[in-house]
Image (cartoon, rainbow, N blue to C red):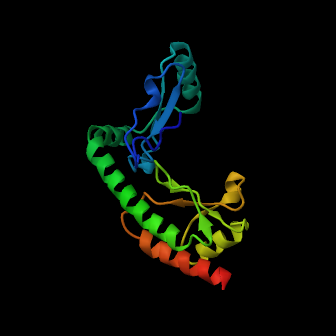
Amino acid sequence: MDEVFHPIYFDSDRPSSAGLENVIVVGDMSKALSLPGLRIGWIIDRDPVRRSAITTARSYLSLGGSPILEAIAVHAMENRSEILARARSVAKRNLATLSQFMGRVSDLLTWVPPKAGVLAFPWFVDGRNSRPFCEHLFSKGVLVVPGDCFEMLDHVRIGFGSQQDGIQEALDIFEAELRCLVD
């Protein structure tokens, strides 16, 4: 179970899957804790044989972590309630802004609003390939990921949780360029 965005939920909190039988949980400091530069993550597995095999494989892939980065990670974990509260607040506020945008452009884009995490994956109503539009947006300073990266040509991946400021300006550009597309 990929839980890199756990516990950022918009409807109700959910427990981790780590306590379930025969489930391997993967998490990291990058997404929900907003600390991608640390490059620290974890795997939780209740099965001791599998856990041993994972630990052995890790030994072949990495010599060890940076003590300074590990100290920062420990500090972040000790203060995770405050960090996660901020991350949830930013994500909820930005999702509200994104939802308003999606309402305004519903003639061109449609979506299923996310119930968790900080990514949305809307798609063009007319089924067009999103790559040319995404490349055009990039030239205007707005970075979104074209759907062909996920084998879904008409989709666009939009991240909305990493920054407290700037989403409205980016969505204003996005909307203006969408309107130019159909005019």
> Is 5 positioned to the left or the right of 138 in the image?
left
> Is 156 positioned to the left or the right of 77 in the image?
right
Up the image or down, 23 lies above or below 107; here it is: above
Residue 30: x percent and y percent? 45, 47
Up the image or down, 24 lies above or below 41; here it is: above
> Observer-nearest residue: 38 or 155?
155
Quadrant location of residue 156?
bottom right
Which residue: 63% across, 83% down? Answer: 180
> Is 6 positioned to the left or the right of 174 in the image?
left
Residue 29: x percent and y percent? 42, 43
Up the image or down, 56 lies above or below 104; here it is: above
> Can you see residue 163?
no
Residue 158: x percent and y percent? 54, 61
Up the image or down, 169 lies above or below 70; here it is: below
Quadrant location of residue 49?
top right
Residue 179: x percent and y percent? 60, 81
> Can you see residue 85?
yes
Q: As drawn, which residue projects farthest toward the bottom?
A: 183
What quarter of the picture does the C terminus occupy? bottom right
Q: As drawn, which residue projects farthest toward the top?
A: 49
Label count reads: 0
> Is 77 positioned to the left or the right of 159 in the image?
left
Which residue: 62% across, 72% down? Answer: 108
